[in-house]
Amino acid sequence: MKRLLIACETIKDEVEMAMQKTGVELEVVWMSNLLHDSPERLKNALQEEIDKAEDRYDELLFAYGNCGNGLLGLKSEKATLIIPRYGDCIDILLCEKENLERIRTSTYFLTQGWLKGEKSLDKEYQHNLEKYGESRARRVMNIMFKNYKNLMLIDTGAYDLAEHLPRVNDIGELIGLEVVVDQGSISPLEKLVAGQWDDGFCIIPLGRITTHHDFEGVAVRKV
């Protein structure tokens, strides 16, 4: 079976590590992390990739959760779609946390991928600083993060924590959040690339559209 992996560049480090650990080599299409700003844009961009690839591949694998329901409404007439049954990539990377729902209520999450993104927290602050001045820029950040207490750097094993901790500490001080480091997991990504698709995956046959029923019981995460 010919397989293509369609993956969010935010978790590029973890996807590449999963392929390295499993010894699986797949052709990958990397999707912009800016697509997370709009579930509709994300869905349309993914459907475009499906339409381009379905003549050449039997199975299309997605390194995505159902981010803001952005993976609903996808369909291929010629390839099977395989999608992890998670709300988003945070759910994927913290899949082993029993108290994840409680953690998510007060925590903002970072990995190397998020820090590299075009809309990282410090870049967002710098943009507001240049546009509005310091006083208003700080007010905007305070409003954005008023319900958060912690800033978590997820240790996925795919990058050097020490390289990023100084920057994360600066961000935490900037927005008034306590920095914590916690262990993550790439197990779902390893299963995805290795073809070990258990009940943690949606397997969408030819001609069927992805729906809410495929992600039944999975929390809907806002983008």
Image: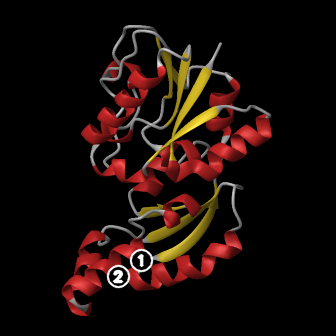
Residue 205 visible in image: yes
Q: Residue at x 64, y 48 (%)?
A: 14
Work out whether residue 210 or residue 218 is closer to the camera in this orientation and state it: 210
- Vertical comparison of 184 with 175: above or below: above
Residue beneath disc 1: 122
- Horizontal and vertical percent position of residue 87: 42, 38
Among all residues in the image, which is located at the extreme bottom? 134
- Horizontal and vertical percent position of residue 63: 53, 37
Whether residue 29 sits left or right of residue 38 in the image: it is: right
- Vertical comparison of 62 with 67: above or below: above
- Vertical comparison of 124 with 13: above or below: below
Work out whether residue 131 or residue 86 is closer to the camera in this orientation and state it: 131
Q: Amino acid at mark 2?
A: Gln
Quarter placement of the N terminus: top right
- Horizontal and vertical percent position of residue 73: 30, 23
- Horizontal and vertical percent position of residue 136: 20, 86
Whether residue 33 sits left or right of residue 137 in the image: it is: right
Q: Residue at x 34, y 36 (%)?
A: 45
Q: CA distance from mark 2 to mark 1?
A: 6 Å
Q: Are marks 2 and 1 in contact (CB under 8 Å)?
A: yes
Q: Residues within 10 Å of mark 1 (few under 14, many from 20)?
A: some
Whether residue 73 sits left or right of residue 174 in the image: it is: left
Whether residue 137 sits left or right of residue 155 in the image: it is: left
Q: Amino acid at mark 1?
A: Asp
SS category of the residue bearing label 1? helix
Mark number for residue 164?
Answer: none
Mark number for residue 126?
Answer: 2
Residue 138 visible in image: no
